Amino acid sequence: MNWDDDTTGTDASERLVGPAADGEDQAVEAALRPKDLGEFIGQEKVREQLDLVLRAARARGATADHVLLSGAPGLGKTTLSMIIAAEMGAPIRITSGPAIQHAGDLAAILSSLQEGEVLFLDEIHRMSRPAEEMLYMAMEDFRVDVIVGKGPGATAIPLELPPFTLVGATTRAGLLPPPLRDRFGFTAHMEFYGPKELERVVHRSAGLLDVDIDPAGAAEIAGRSRGTPRIANRLLRRVRDYAQVKADGLITQEIAAAALAVYEVDARGLDRLDRAVLEALLKLFGGGPVGLSTLAVAVGEERETVEEVAEPFLVREGLLARTPRGRVATPAAWAHLGLTPPRAQGSGNGQQDLFGT
């Protein structure tokens, strides 16, 4: 997969290291998903806490508390929701915030739930406000008021709901209003994975996909996966293709490195867009500071693409900093691209003065 420069910008879903799941990812993830908490790799604290919540609920013979999972895409929120349903021996209903635009949409879903069923609501922060207000009562009292008619003649008909468990997932927990957050009995934040955890993910996925891989090959893929299991599994599939065509099928460190070089994913997980942003910042603007709009024009992308697609990972990796005067490259960025930073001017101490003082 290549990303050719054009005037339309880069779609995050087209990137090999993008966190969003496309149709192929969703199909493969269904086969690779762990079925219970024992199989789930990483997120040790979340697994331990969630295990206590579910075991206690089973011991009481009650439905589990409502669960809120927050964190970046690709860390396992959907997988955990399915595990919750499996651990509770209950069916699961899956929907998303953008799909619920009216209170009636939510009422139709809630009224059809079975007792103990798990309702997984992805991107819960994008649900409409009327539906959100209806959800308050449903979560707390297992009841909704259905409005029949309009104007002065409208009548509210109370509708009792069977006990259910809501699992909400969000990438932006700060956008959830406090009344909604407070109604979740258990909240958990999903952290990015470490290299060792990702190596375990790669080995497990390789076994399920019947791919031969050695420890060094798994470590090479894990190191370029940006702390995200979804990306690790995607890179594994692309390296598998390369190994089958260019080698004997065994994924070694050399094969993994050669394959990911073809797909333009470097040793730190940066792709073409990431490097284009860094190179423009370093080579054209001497490391900054430079405004976001100017930087976007320099790389031929939309402002939103640079800000929302490329910058988060660059900032997290310590390669780029956002300052009041604009974007600034860090010493790590110069080192990663093998460039020498210009001598600082005006400070006299060898340090670049980011704020001009």
Image (cartoon, rainbow, N blue to C red):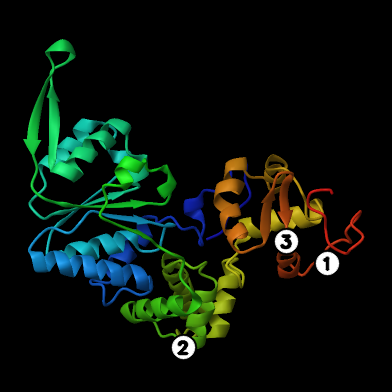
In the rendered structure, which disc, 2 or 3, sits on the residue that comes first in sequence? 2
Q: Which mark is residue 330?
A: 3
Dot 1 or dot 3: first in sequence order is: 3
Could you tell me if residue 229 is visible in this image? yes
Q: Residue at x 22, y 65 (%)?
A: 53
Residue at 47% x, 87% y: name it.
215
In the image, residue 27 above or below residue 201? above
- The residue singled out by tag 2 in the image is 214
Residue at (42%, 57%) from the top-left corner? 73
> Which is in the foreground here, disc 2 or disc 3?
3
Mark linked to residue 340? 1
Mark nearer the viewer, 1 or 3: 3
Image x and y of residue 298, in percent: 73, 46
Q: Nearer the viewer, residue 10 or 127?
A: 127
| Rendered location of residue 179, percent (x, y) | 31, 41
Residue 305 position within the rendered picture, expressed as x and y whole percent measured from the top left: 58, 46
How many callouts does the rendering have?
A: 3
Asked if disc 1 and disc 3 are in contact, CB closer than 8 Å, the reply is no
Label 3 residue SS:
loop
Q: Say whether marks 2 and 1 touch (CB < 8 Å).
A: no
How far separated are the C-alphas under marks 2 and 3? 35 Å
